[in-house]
């Protein structure tokens, strides 16, 4: 798996992401600066990592979404290439129009930095094939604007098309208001694009991939991507 | 030429910041506040003098960057 990690000023999770990608695939990820106008040849996966691009000025992800490299990411996605956006990356993909909806201020206004539980809604996608449908995983979140919202029509479509891949839940897998940490519509933690090749998610699977982190539940996502791409090759 | 672009949340979009401000005003004892919605104001200086051109440029700016039209409305005023 040849992956490219897009780097914007103010991003701070790119090295965690590159480390997780290397661990899963055995290949060093290419770091691509925001001013680039193309991606490395043969890229299989583009990752937009977390952080605070451009200091979250204007709106989270708004300025990064208009950076030169995003045209290349848009072309890559249009050709069916796999794109993963985590945290600020999710916000950037929404702002760039690669995913519907928007990440609003957390409903209870607080920045949330802790482990959460996610229910994997289906296992038949490149982004979830490393898990079983219904499986509960534990991964960290660190965000102030993770409250996913979209108009009613869009949410209805996302649900009917099975595009919600990860939902906030209790440790037992129950999706309810108390487990919905940021007030997201339908407890949505991660959604895919219409074609299913672009995933945005608020939690950080890349931070739960090694024993030293105390949990390896995030590994499945990366292992699944590697398995998907190997099968495709 | 000076212009102002005002960006506000669409009605129906939950505004937790506005709610917090509303609560703070109430606890300050400011009377008669029914509700608060917060937004953004951009004061922009334009180099040309053509009003039609300026209006078009400002609309472009608002659509492309200043507002996220999924959740926000905007108003352009030439001052």
Image (spheres, rainbow, N blue to C red):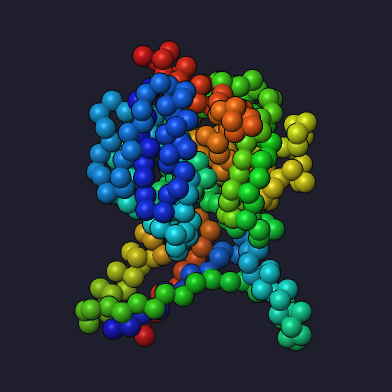
Point out the residue furthest to the front here. A212
Q: Is A186 on the left-hand or right-hand side of A81? A: right
- Residue A119: x %, y % from top left: 67, 31
Q: Is B6 on the left-hand or right-hand side of A44? A: right
Give the vertical position of A85 relative to A214 (above or below): below
Residue at 32%, 28% in the rendered image: A43
Give the vertical position of A162 relative to A188 (above or below): above
Taking the image as drawn, is residue A151 in sight? no
Residue at 30%, 45% in the rendered image: A33
Kindly indicate the quadrant of the structure image that contains residue A220: top right
Residue at 40%, 21% in the rendered image: A26
Give the vertical position of B16 relative to A188 (above or below): below
- Residue A200: x %, y % from top left: 51, 39
- Residue B31: x %, y % from top left: 75, 86
Q: Is A196 on the left-hand or right-hand side of B38? A: left
Q: Nearer the viewer, residue B26 or B77?
A: B26
Q: Nearer the viewer, residue A179 or B65?
A: A179
Residue at 43%, 49% in the rendered image: A11
- Residue B38: x %, y % from top left: 58, 71
Q: Is A171 on the left-hand or right-hand side of A99? A: right
Q: Which of the image's four quarters has the N terminus of chain A?
A: top left
Taking the image as drawn, is residue B28 in sight? yes
Q: Which of the image's four quarters has the C terminus of chain A?
A: top left
The image shows a total of numbered marks equal to 0
Kindly indicate the quadrant of the structure image that contains residue A120: top right
Q: Nearer the viewer, residue A170 or A154?
A: A170
């Amino acid at each position: 798996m040849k992956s490219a990690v897009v780097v914007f000023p103010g991003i701070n999770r790119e090295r965690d992401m590159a480390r997780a990608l290397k661990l899963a695939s055995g290949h060093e990820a290419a770091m691509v600066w925001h001013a680039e106008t193309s991606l490395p040849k043969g890229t299989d996966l583009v990752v937009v990592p977390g952080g605070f691009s451009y200091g979250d000025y204007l709106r989270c992800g708004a300025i990064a979404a208009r950076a030169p490299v995003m045209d290349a990411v848009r072309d890559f996605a249009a050709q069916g290439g796999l794109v993963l956006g985590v945290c600020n990356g999710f916000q950037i993909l929404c702002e760039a129009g690669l995913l519907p909806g928007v990440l609003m201020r957390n409903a209870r206004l607080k920045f949330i930095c802790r482990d959460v539980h996610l229910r994997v809604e289906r296992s038949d996608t490149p982004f979830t094939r490393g898990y079983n449908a219904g499986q509960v995983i534990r991964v960290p979140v660190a965000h102030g604007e993770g409250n996913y919202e979209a108009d009613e029509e869009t949410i209805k479509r996302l649900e009917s098309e099975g595009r919600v891949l990860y939902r906030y839940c209790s440790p037992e897998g129950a999706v309810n208001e108390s487990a919905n940490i940021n007030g997201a519509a339908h407890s949505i933690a991660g959604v895919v694009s219409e074609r299913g090749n672009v995933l945005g998610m608020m939690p950080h699977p890349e931070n739960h991939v090694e024993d030293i982190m105390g949990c390896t539940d995030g590994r499945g996502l990366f292992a699944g991507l590697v398995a998907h791409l190997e099968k495709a090759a | 030429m000076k212009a102002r672009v005002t960006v506000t949340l669409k009605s129906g979009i939950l505004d937790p910041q506005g709610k917090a401000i509303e609560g703070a005003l109430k606890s300050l004892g400011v009377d008669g506040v029914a509700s608060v919605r917060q937004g953004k104001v951009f004061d922009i200086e334009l180099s040309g003098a053509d009003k039609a051109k300026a209006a078009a440029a400002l609309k472009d700016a608002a659509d492309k960057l200043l507002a996220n039209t999924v959740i926000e409305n905007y108003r352009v005023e030439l001052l």
